[in-house]
Image (cartoon, rainbow, N blue to C red):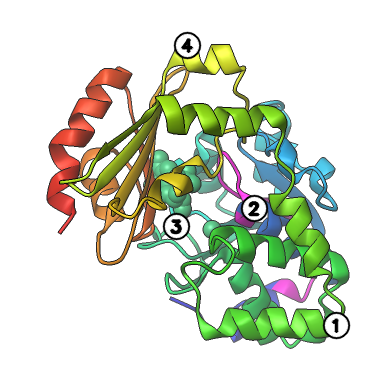
Amino acid sequence: MIDDILEIKPVLSQPKDVVIISHRNPDGDAIGSSLAMSDYLKSMGHFVKCILPSEYPENFEWMEGVESFMIYDLKPDSCLKAIQQADLIVCLDFNSLDRIDKMGVAVSENQKAFKFLMDHHLDPEPFADYYYCDDQSSSTCELVYRFISDMGHETEISDAMAEAIYTGIITDTGSFHHATNPLIFRMIGSLKERGLDDTSLQNNIFNNQTEKQMRLLGYCLSKRLVVKKEEGIGLVYLTRRDYQNFDIQRGDTEGIINHVLKIRDVKLAAFITAQPKIVKLSLRSKGEISVQALARDHFNGGGHFNASGGYMHSSLGNVIDKFWEFAPSYVK
Ligand code: 5GP
Ligand code: MN
């Protein structure tokens, strides 16, 4: 669902108080798309604030501009005030307002603001005035690039914007392993022609783990991995005690699930963790297996066909039991 660019051009033609919001537990795409859109809108003369529901992982501290993010968990009142005062609200990389917690209510209640949703998840919720949504897109960062091109400003993409866009595409496609399409290769080609230093970005993104993160990965694979070969399913779980013992912080568990999917016999992978208030699930699959359906039908969640997530208010043991009860029927 991509609305006509002519509908948004007049909205952007006058300076506005803009708030850009992305999702909880922000990943490279949430952070990259926010930073690139922020720089773009600032270059058009708008006043822009970027808000995230929760903090970004330390692994992204190298990105230009991240220090200016407002974090709802740290300063809820100033974030809500910014949303109330905004006359343009740009929502990036999520498809329904419940993904941004209490800020979702503030977004609904601000009747004067023009609402712009840019996203690549399935089934965007109808809350916006303008949609730039495509579930065939690799990432929201790809959509940012396409949007800027549609606006006629492709050549004005700055180095910092290019780096932010590249980071979102690389992280959301797992380094071009999935969710790829011909367009992203052309985009990256044209960014490279204009000087993008992808080698050093690759180092920043991937060769940037802490020793603790690597040891945690080892622990997960040696002590917390369950593979049911006959079902084609692999699962890694972490208990509350694991969180304490390893002093696990935001971002430390990023990417662990991808290692489960590397196993030849695994077609559906799960990473189930006991968080302070909820049990969180991350789900990944190969080929024609919809983890989006599994997350939606049984775990209050959703996402993409091959990468989804959800949560439950229950014990870790119950959630793992429920997972083994329902997941096998989704593996064809
Ligand atoms: P991750 O496993 O990396 O946390 O999330 C993978 C995908 O699933 C993301 O695209 C994210 O939007 C989606 N997702 C993760 N958790 C939830 C959730 O609780 N609800 C919904 N609707 N989507 C989720
Ligand atoms: Mn994304």
Q: CA distance from mark 4 to mark 3?
A: 40 Å
What residue does disc 4 label?
Answer: 241
Q: Secondary structure at mark 1?
A: loop
Label 4 sits on what residue type? Answer: Arg
Q: Which numbered tag is attached to residue 194?
A: 1
Q: CA distance from mark 4 to mark 2?
A: 28 Å
Q: Which numbered tag is attached to residue 27?
A: none
Give yes or no for contact between labels 4 and 2 (Cβ–Cβ under 8 Å).
Answer: no
Q: Position of residue 317 (x, y in %)?
A: 26, 19
Which of label 2 and label 3 is nearer to you?
Answer: 2
Q: CA distance from mark 1 to mark 3?
A: 37 Å
What residue does disc 3 label?
Answer: 127
Q: Position of residue 107 (x, y in %)?
A: 55, 46
If the image is split into quadrants, where does the N terminus sit?
A: bottom left
Residue at 39 percent across and 27 percent down: it is 224
Residue at 15 percent across and 59 percent down: it is 332
Q: CA distance from mark 1 to mark 4?
A: 49 Å
Ligand 2, image quadrant it occupies: bottom right
In the image, the segment drawn in magenta is 12-29
Q: Position of residue 144 (x, y in %)?
A: 65, 71
Camera-nearest residue between 205 and 49: 205
Give yes or no for contact between labels 1 and 4 (Cβ–Cβ under 8 Å).
Answer: no
What residue does disc 2 label?
Answer: 28
